[in-house]
Image (tube, coloured by chain):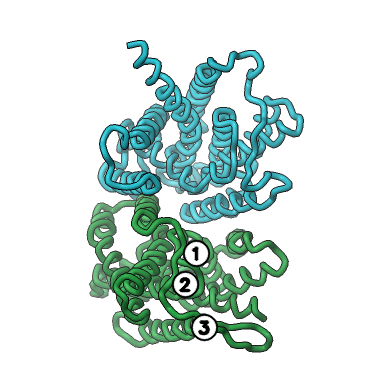
Chain colours: A cyan, B green
């Protein structure tokens, strides 16, 4: 029994570590899409900015906590920059510009080796309290830390969306004309939502770097954005609780498909497995939007899905 | 000079593929993020017909167009029309289209793998023109692209269905009450838009390697082209495509080639900031 537990426990820890990172990442998207109705298809860019800023500042001698704060701030700043040309226009433009930005950023990460070390990636940076926690317990410590961060972000967001500020966001999602008739500056509210959502993604990026200890441009492929989307839509748009559950389900599914070939024979090769997973993600995204757009925990009333 | 020729070749491919994106954007009122993957799909079908079935590339070209259109019509029947009937919002349609993009691209990856492919055609030496080298394939691409643009112009301005399509993209409700069969015209919009996208995809395979992500990397230049030319304006899109193709290639004179498509991004951001309706007007 204890032996079985000993083999299973590390897997569960891994799933929960990834789930907590992606839950924070997706909570940022949920604020943008779920509560404000913004379509951000380049969420991974802010993930990458947070991760890279944190580790690059740290290896050049900056204390860890300041590096993380800088990463979060820079991710938020880029959200601001992208919001300016797009948020006054129709929602499609933000989708197009953010998806483009995430690709451009990735090619910058690949090619500006003087800054980012290009395809070789960055490693050898500090991890929080690495010198005081014994190595064999480090992942357990990291899990506790990440869950604490997740809980903190969750309650901060819940407070925000229940405040008058959050009610304006929801009214923008429902119908922009109403808050602007009431004298609210819709553009400014959307911009704030995008900045906060992006900053949260930046924080998740720092968490990811601490866990995997090595980042390179391939860590931040466009597909990560759609992991966040599937988490939000599966869990329930505009439900922060749903987002957390969605993250756990997604990572349980990923770990399941990684090891499924050890249990049942799979008729295709390992490199096809990655493509197969993405087909499932894409299909799930389509089917959920077509037949159950409110997800598991969402409600139909909270959806901005009919004009 | 070499860069200008390369730019014209890529520009004409961007132009004909982007017309479909622009037409569907305007008529159905949503951005089809799977459009680039339809382009890649066509290139793979042509590759399959050409190498596995062993037919001539010209026949493979027609098979690819037909297959792409069939896939598009199938999607219209099972996804887009039911969603329109449910009065789904633009945002829902956009998310479904990106989901379909993932499915389509990874299906190509699943079947043919990630390595680059090319058609089974003889490699011929290019010829010199003003000190630049042009390959036969490049000439072919430009000729076919211009024939297609001309056909489109004829279709839109001279035929009933073209006029109905323009009416629909102008105002769908007015078109409906003036007795136009809206669903039928939408179907035609898909057929023509995806037919052009498929032609662009097969041509693209002639001048570059075929790989699952080829459509994805074409998506950003296509968006830049339609935003520059004004959404729903086919002639603007052609000009926009040429401008984007040329500026991408010319940028390689000063920037590393890896930043080619960053150029489209910058052009797009600047246009949105200064003149979001595009240089030649279009949907706001």
Q: Tell me the chain of label 3.
A: B
Who is closer to the viewer here, A36 or B187? B187
Measured as percent of width and height from the top left, residue B1 is found at 67, 81
Say left or right for B59 vs B37.
Answer: left
Left or right of A101? Residue A250 is left
**Count of marks placed on residues:** 3
Residue B159 is situated, as x and y percent measured from the top left of the image, at 32, 85
Query: In the image, A260: left or right of A12?
Result: left
Residue A89 seen in the figure: no
Instruction: Establish whether labels 2 and 3 are both on one chain.
Output: yes
Q: Tell which of B122 and A86 is nearer to you.
A: B122
B169 shown above or below A140:
below
In the picture, residue B16 is in which quadrant?
Answer: bottom left
- Where disc 3 sits, the SS reads loop
Asked if residue A108 is positioned above or below residue B9 in the image, the reply reads: above
Q: Which mark is residue B204?
A: 2
Cβ–Cβ below 8 Å for labels 2 and 1?
Answer: yes
Do we see residue A174 in this rendering? yes
Chain identity of mark 1: B
Q: Residue at x 69, y 30 (%)?
A: A67
Chain letter for the residue marked with disc 2 in the picture: B
Q: Which mark is residue B124?
A: 3
């Amino acid at each position: 029994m204890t032996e079985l537990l000993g083999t299973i426990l590390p897997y569960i820890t891994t799933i929960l570590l990834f789930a907590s990172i992606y839950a924070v990442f997706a909570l940022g998207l949920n604020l943008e899409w779920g509560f404000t109705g913004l379509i951000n298809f380049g969420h991974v860019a802010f993930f990458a900015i947070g991760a890279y800023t944190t580790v690059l500042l740290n290896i050049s001698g900056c204390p860890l906590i300041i590096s993380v704060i800088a990463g979060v701030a820079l991710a938020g700043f880029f959200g601001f920059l992208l919001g300016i040309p797009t948020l006054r226009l129709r929602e499609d433009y933000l989708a197009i510009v953010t998806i483009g930005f995430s690709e451009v950023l990735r090619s910058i990460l690949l090619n500006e080796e003087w800054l980012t070390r290009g395809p070789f990636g960055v490693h050898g940076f500090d991890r929080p309290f690495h010198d005081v926690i014994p190595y064999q317990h480090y992942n357990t410590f990291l899990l506790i830390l990440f869950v604490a961060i997740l809980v903190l972000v969750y309650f901060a967001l819940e407070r925000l969306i229940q405040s008058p500020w959050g009610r304006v966001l929801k009214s923008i999602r429902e119908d922009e004309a109403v808050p602007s008739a009431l004298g609210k500056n819709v553009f400014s509210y959307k911009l704030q939502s995008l900045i906060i959502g992006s900053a949260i993604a930046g924080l998740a990026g720092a968490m990811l770097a601490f866990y995997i200890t090595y980042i390179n441009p391939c860590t931040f492929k466009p597909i990560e954005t759609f992991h966040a989307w599937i988490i939000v839509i599966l869990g329930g748009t505009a439900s922060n609780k749903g987002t957390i559950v969605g993250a756990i389900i997604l990572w349980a599914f990923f770990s399941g498909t990684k090891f499924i070939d050890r249990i049942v024979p799979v008729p295709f090769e390992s490199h096809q497995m990655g493509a197969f997973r993405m087909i499932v993600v894409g299909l799930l995204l389509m089917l959920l939007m077509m037949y159950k757009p409110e997800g598991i925990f969402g409600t139909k009333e909270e959806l901005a899905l009919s004009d | 000079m070499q860069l200008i020729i390369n730019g014209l070749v890529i520009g004409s491919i961007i132009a004909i593929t982007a017309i479909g994106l622009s037409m569907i954007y305007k008529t159905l009122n949503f951005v089809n993020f799977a459009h680039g993957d339809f382009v890649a799909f066509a290139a793979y079908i042509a590759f399959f017909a050409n190498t596995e079935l062993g037919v001539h590339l010209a026949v493979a070209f027609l098979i690819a167009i037909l297959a792409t259109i069939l896939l598009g019509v199938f999607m219209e029947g099972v996804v887009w029309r039911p969603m329109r009937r449910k009065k789904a919002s633009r945002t829902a349609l956009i998310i479904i289209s990106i989901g379909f993009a993932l499915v389509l691209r990874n299906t190509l990856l699943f079947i043919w793998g990630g390595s680059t492919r090319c058609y089974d055609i003889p490699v011929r030496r290019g010829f010199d023109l003003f000190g630049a080298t042009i390959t036969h394939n490049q000439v072919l691409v430009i000729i076919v692209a211009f024939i297609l643009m001309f056909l489109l112009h004829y279709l839109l301005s001279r035929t009933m269905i073209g006029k109905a399509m323009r009416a629909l993209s102008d105002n769908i409700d007015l078109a409906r009450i003036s007795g136009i069969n809206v669903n039928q015209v939408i179907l035609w919009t898909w057929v023509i838009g995806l037919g052009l996208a498929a032609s662009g995809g097969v041509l693209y395979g002639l001048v570059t390697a075929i790989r699952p992500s080829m459509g994805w990397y074409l998506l950003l230049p296509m968006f830049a082209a339609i935003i520059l030319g004004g959404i729903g304006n086919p002639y603007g899109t052609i000009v926009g495509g040429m401008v984007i193709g040329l500026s991408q290639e010319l940028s390689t004179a000063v920037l590393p080639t890896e930043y080619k498509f960053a150029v489209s991004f910058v052009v797009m951001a600047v246009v949105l900031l200064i003149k979001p309706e595009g240089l030649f007007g279009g949907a706001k």
